[in-house]
Image (tube, helix red, strand yellow):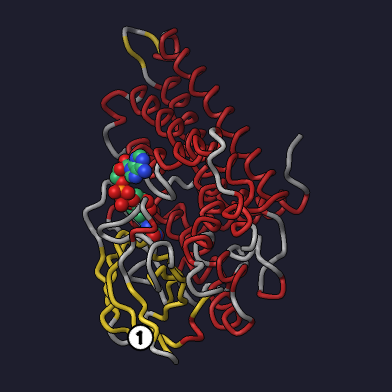
Amino acid sequence: MSPFTESHQLLRQSFRQFVEKEITPNVKHWEENKICEREVFTKMGQQGFFGVSFPEAYGGSGMDMWSAVVISEELTRANIGGLAMSLYAHCYLPLPVINALGTEEQKQNYLVPALKGEKIAALGITEPGAGSDVGGIKTTAEDKGDYFVVNGSKMFITNGTMADFIVLAVRTGEGHALSLLLFDTKITGFSAVPVHNKLGMHSSDTGQLFFENCVVPKSALLGEKDFGFYYIMSNFQEERLIASVTGTASAENALEKAKQYMKEREAFGRPIAKFQVLRHKIAQMAIKVEACRSLSYRAVGEYIEKGPAAYYIVSVAKAYVCEEAFNVANEALQIHGGWGYMEDYGIARAFRDLRLLTVGAGTTEIMHEIISKIEMDEVRHEKVQIKARV
Ligand SMILES: Cc1cc2nc3c(=O)[nH]c(=O)nc-3n(C[C@H](O)[C@H](O)[C@H](O)COP(=O)(O)OP(=O)(O)OC[C@H]3O[C@@H](n4cnc5c(N)ncnc54)[C@H](O)[C@@H]3O)c2cc1C
């Protein structure tokens, strides 16, 4: 049974029209010139597409997580992974944290304008020396009584050079004592440079960030001091769900492209669609797409029911879908032969953009770590309780 209601279908229709009008005609230009347009954020916000799964009190539509699935699936149809990642990195990485932990003042100052597309957001966790090992981050926020002083740097931050504010992970003590700050990028001592030499996701803004004696008011603290590590672990669930849904939709797009090409292309005097070896590839790809969809939809369903406590199935979906989606794109490229290696059919872009999914939002190896710990009964109970706080 479809999880999508009539409201979801209406949203799908109107967002599909938006993508066709505002995004699809610009894909080639933005990708070739590595452009991420601020204007797209403004238009998304003005039309309410960022806020679909956020509370009405803050400018959202108050719909459930299936509405975010609709947005993700429709955006993926445009085959522009970079821009899609920038839009998710604005909406589904930092904003759920503010929604869950923010004070009323923080929500009015950051969540509301971000949902309207007036302010661009980023999530700053990864550092040059620490990605998977979140507990190893070195950027410090020294407590000076009325304010913090932030020093350090962040790496690979999506929207890093465009962001008006960053939900920033900082060290406030030893071990896992991290905290989250709502960092305003106008603060003196902050600077950002673009990271240009990426394999794919060309239409996204990726930045390296520097913090030099940045004075941050105490009012910027999100949630409780020193609880940041657990907030981060909890917040990853939404990011991983979106990665799973996007991976599934991208794999489906790649499959469609491969089927289309097989019907058009001839070799040895007949359409390549007549070769059984390729037909079986299509069957195997279709099976993988179905498995990816079932798993990611099941994870969304459990997340709606249990929140971050659904992290087992979310990790399973993230691990499986992101690996298999790339495998499907790889086979789709193979079916395109030499033309698959060119930009003409869009399959090269889908292939290189999908490659990021097994690395971002927690690598496949980290997903395997989480799953194996749960399977081996090694998860400590109190951590699960803290996760449920967010
Ligand atoms: C284009 C792009 C956009 C990104 N956007 C953001 C963003 O917006 N915000 C943000 O904070 N970060 C972002 N990232 C960072 C991304 O989340 C990290 O790159 C990712 O988490 C991996 O961290 P790392 O690069 O430090 O690799 P490492 O952690 O150094 O991993 C290297 C290898 O070691 C493996 N490994 C590490 N630990 C273990 C372990 N315990 N067991 C087994 N294997 C292990 C990994 O799986 C990997 O294969 C982005 C990255 C890219 C490339």
Q: Residue at x 72, y 71 (%)?
A: 56
Q: Is mark 1 within 8 Å of ligand 1?
A: no
256, above or below 37, in the image: above
Residue drawn 44% across the image and 7% down it:
276
Residue 349 visible in rendering: no
**Which quarter of the figure is the N terminus placed in?**
top right
Give the mark count: 1
Whether residue 279 is visible here, answered yes or no, is: yes
Nearer to me, 158 or 228 = 228
Q: Residue furthest bottom?
A: 146
Q: Is residue 163 left or right of residue 18?
A: left
Q: Who's the residue at 47% across and 66% down the image?
A: 40
Residue 94 position (above or below residue 357): below
Residue matched to label 1: 187
x and y percentages locating residue 261 in the rendered image = 41, 25
Q: In the image, is residue 224 above or below residue 235?
A: below
The location of residue 182, given as percent across then percent down, is 47, 77
Q: Position of residue 253 (x, y in %)?
A: 49, 36
As helix, strand or loop, the secondary structure at mark 1 comes to loop
Q: Residue 55: x and y, percent?
A: 69, 68
Q: Quadrant of the C terminus?
A: bottom right
Q: Could you classify mark 1 by the number of other residues whose Cα lies within 10 Å: few (under 14), some (14-19), or many (20 or more)?
A: some
For the point 58% across and 64% down, the residue is: 96
Q: Amino acid at mark 1?
A: Ile
- 44 or 251, nearer to the observer: 251
